[in-house]
Image (tube, rainbow, N blue to C red):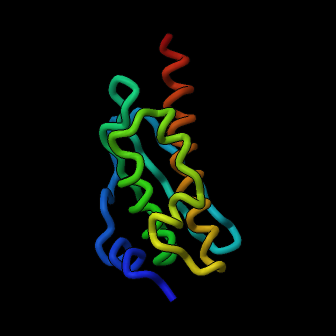
């Protein structure tokens, strides 16, 4: 049902935790399935230098959270904004159709963290 990559990221998730002085924080949830995802980013010179996540949800939600952190770290804000829901699923070598909403959450949480960063930065200018 799940690819080896999904199982690997579920069993050994990368970048779990939170960043105390995060540049941006994004939290999204899906009330239907109960998944809740928060992504924390640290941005320096427009580049995501650190990224962590906390996810309450199924194995696919944890795997997509882990994968998106690996995909976004080291990227500029604009590059990270281009990561799509399908990119996350493709990078995990697919998700069952019933679990595709999990890749939506991961991409949405990253976008929310970036939006939070941009709002905070705009306020500081």
Viewer-nearest residue: 14 or 123: 14
Give the side of residue 106 with respect to residue 20, left or right: right
Compared with 112, 120 (above or below) is: above
Q: Residue at x 35, y 23 (%)?
A: 45
Give the side of residue 18 with respect to residue 98, left or right: left
Q: Residue furthest right?
A: 32
Viewer-nearest residue: 87 or 34: 87
Q: Residue at x 40, y 41 (%)?
A: 41
Give the side of residue 3 with respect to residue 18, left or right: right
Report the number of numbered marks. 0
Q: Position of residue 73 (x, y in %)?
A: 35, 45
Q: Residue at x 38, y 75 (%)?
A: 5
Q: Residue at x 36, y 71 (%)?
A: 9
Q: Position of residue 72 (x, y in %)?
A: 41, 47
Q: Residue furthest top?
A: 125
Q: Position of residue 112 (x, y in %)?
A: 57, 43
Compared with 15, 46 (above or below) is: above
Q: Position of residue 103 (x, y in %)?
A: 56, 64
């Amino acid at each position: 049902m799940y690819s080896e990559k999904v199982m690997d990221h579920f069993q050994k998730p990368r970048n779990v935790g939170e960043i105390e002085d995060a540049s941006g924080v994004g939290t999204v949830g899906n009330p239907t399935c109960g998944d809740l995802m928060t992504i924390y980013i640290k941005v320096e010179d427009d580049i995501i230098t650190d990224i962590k996540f906390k996810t309450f949800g199924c194995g696919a939600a944890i795997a997509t959270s882990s994968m998106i952190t690996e995909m976004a770290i080291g990227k500029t804000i604009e590059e990270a904004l281009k990561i799509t829901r399908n990119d996350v699923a493709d990078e995990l070598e697919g998700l069952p159709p019933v679990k595709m909403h999990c890749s939506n959450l991961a991409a949405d949480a990253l976008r929310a963290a970036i939006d939070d960063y941009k709002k905070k930065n705009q306020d500081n200018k």
